[in-house]
Image (cartoon, helix red, strand yellow):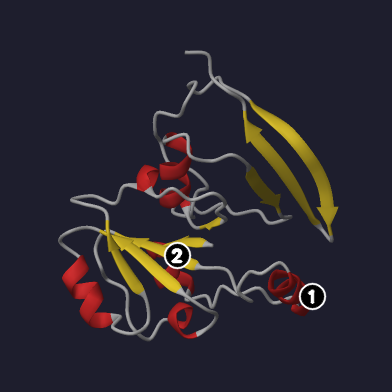
Amino acid sequence: MLIGGNTLRSDNPRLLVNSEKRRADRIVAGKPEYPLKVTISASGDLGRDLKFWHFGDKKVVYTTDAAAPKLRETLDGLADVVITGPTVDLATRGVERLMVEGGGQIHTQFLSQGLADEIHLAIAPLLVGEAAAPRFLHPANYPGGSGHRMALLEARTIGDVVLLRYAPKPTSD
């Protein structure tokens, strides 16, 4: 599970698997009870008091050369700090399966770099008319351009919410 640093600071989530059955199924499958929790921070401004560090199992923070010393001191004993260079480079991680829980900045980075295999988009019956409200995506150059469509894999209701699952269609080079 990956969460962006901005979302971590603003929402202060524990980010856990709450279902006892799912945790038990993970153990039966030879996995840890909780998945690895990952965050990304270019600034290194992540407080030791955030709930994220104190619940679940292993945690990792990916960061820059400049922010690493600060994070290692702040998070000593709470998380592994991995340096990706002068910027946070998402494409070099070698991850097989990753759930990304974040805001517009982190979603934009993954989608604009073509790193998402599937998108789960929940549509809730809320009308947000504030100009400064968070957005799912920010302006960027996305693979295939703005006219490139995704493939709808599933649409289902969960209470009063609709979950849409999409897969980016391959682009022709």
Q: Residue at x 55, y 54 (%)?
A: 98
Residue 128 x/y as whole percent: 59, 54
Q: Nearest the camera: 37 or 101? A: 37
Horizontally, is 152 left or right of 48 in the view?
A: right
Q: Residue at x 66, y 48 (%)?
A: 120
Label 1 CA crowd tier, 10 Å (few <14, some 14–19, many 20+) = few
The image quadrant where one finds the N terminus is bottom right
Q: Nearest the camera: 126 or 50? A: 50
Q: Please name the amino acid that badge 1 sits on.
A: Lys
Horizontally, is 61 left or right of 25 in the view?
A: left
Using the numbered discs, state the Cα–Cα distance from disc 2 to disc 1 in whole angstroms.
23 Å
Callout 1: helix, strand or loop?
helix
Callout 2: helix, strand or loop?
strand
Residue 13 x/y as whole percent: 52, 75
Q: Nearest the camera: 51 or 58? A: 58
Q: Please name the amino acid that badge 2 sits on.
A: Val
Residue to which mark 1 is pinned:
21
Find residue 38 and name its label: 2
Which comes sooner in the sequence, label 2 or label 1? Answer: 1
Horizontally, is 151 left or right of 90 in the view?
A: right
Residue 95 x/y as whole percent: 48, 51
